[in-house]
Image (spheres, helix red, strand yellow):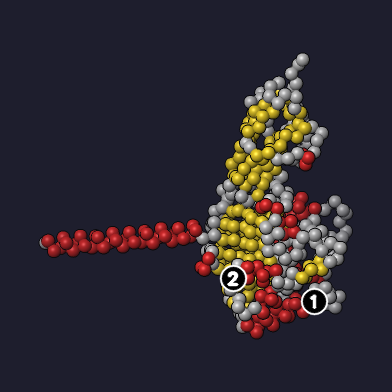
Amino acid sequence: MKNMKRRIISWMLAAVMVMTSAAVWMGNEKQAEAAASFKVHFIEVGTGDGALLQYGSGKSAKYALIDAGPQTTQLLGGKTIDVSRRVHNYLKKYKIRRLEFIIMTHPHKDHIGGFISILEDRSISVGKVYATQQPVYNHYSGDDDFYSTKTYRTVNELIAERGIPVVVPRMKSSVYLGKAKLTFYSPGRTNFKYGREVDFNSRQVNKFSLVCRITYGKNSFLMTGDTQQESEYDMISQRLKLKSQVLKVPHHGYEDVRNKDAKGKFSSNHKKFFDKVQPAISIISNGYRNKDRVPSGLITRELAKSNIYTTGDNGNIIVTSNGSRLSVSTSRNKNEPAKASTYVSSKKSSLLLKKMSVKSNGKKKLSIVSVNAKNKYKIKEKKPLKISIKATPQSFTRIKNVQYKLVKKGKSSAKYRWKTGKKVKVKKGFKGRLYIKYNTTSGSTIVKTKGFVIKKKKK
């Protein structure tokens, strides 16, 4: 009997030890997952695309590339500069010797030219190539000299020499980089037709760009290559989950409109797509002082709800996810977006903020409006105002600080400097409005209050 009791106690102790070990192991696993980060490095490559994907850090980090930029890029005034090794040098800077895979979104040289030096470097191993199903030479005719097939053929020859497997991904198929999941969305069709007045062979190739949505935890990125309206509408009709916190804006910020549309009477071909994605952060890979002056004003206006970062203004842009929150860092402009969001909904929210509000000790309610709203000065107070500024961030970001400036009636807000603080005192005799800038780890939202007047003390 005693032996039986001892055995039972031994079994129970063993079970407890196993359960404890499992709990510790699972806890360590969760800590490891929480510690891992996923980053997308949008590399400044001129007017082209080159994005490095990074999961984790140190010796255990995993890397992949989506496009690798052009060999040359043109600036305003016609000057041509060599950018052929920009991505290659970026890999060497971070001592990257292994790419799990590379994605060639489509065979245009402003996206694949940089792969030549990378593939020539045998010290960098490549596990796999994902490529579009439409070969460049299926579409090119003699008048398309600007987009010659030479670059594409050179890249293909290097891939073949190294024996790297090439995969044409199926729509909705997925691949992983660590715990980050990439799902291919486009092209879902192979029969896109010429259908617009400005359509020509190079645009036809753009329609077959590989588009993928990346998810890591609660964060999402939509990578679009040079996708065009036809392929965008196809993705919408397929009811794919397009809404993403980060958008790599299609085709470097070009409008892609029809010649027959009168100036100012049209939207870009991407407008419907932007409205479906609803990005809080928009990345445009366009190049500094590029010859075509992209992004166009129309594109940036249509993305006014979003924070816009451009490689031309911000240099290299790194968006980091820990699985729940996003942060943006840039090599130029102190992590500030090229264009901050100026959007405020009727519920006083934005894509970065769940709620924005101002409270004052005045008798009339002071409310927030868009910076584009017409200035009216119907709120009149007799005593100095004490205003407090509040906001609640969306779950994927956090507020770094709040800035403000008091702008007098008839004056441009651009002439005033931002001050930091959540409390504002306004003296008697002021007539104007309060501008507010909510700075988060993912960008900024700029709004203003309705105009107000504080009467002067009678003499």
Q: Residues within 10 Å of mark 2 (few under 14, many from 20)?
A: some
In the image, which disc is placed on residue 96? Answer: 2
Q: As shown in the figure, which amino acid type bears the numbered disc 1?
A: Ser
**Nearer to me, 231 or 15:** 15
What residue do we see at 70% from left, 26% from top? 427
Q: Residue furthest top?
A: 459
What residue do we see at 63% from left, 83% from top? 162
What residue do we see at 65% from left, 43% from top? 438
Q: Residue furthest bottom?
A: 161
- In the rendered structure, the answer to whether residue 436 lies left or right of residue 409 reads left
Q: Is residue 176 visible?
A: no
Quadrant location of residue 392?
Answer: top right
The x and y percentages for residue 273 are: 71, 57
The x and y percentages for residue 96 are: 59, 71
Q: Secondary structure at mark 2?
A: loop
From the image, tell me which residue sits under label 1.
Answer: 148
Task: Say which quadrant the C terminus sits in.
Answer: top right
The tag earlier along the polypeptide, 2 or 1, is 2
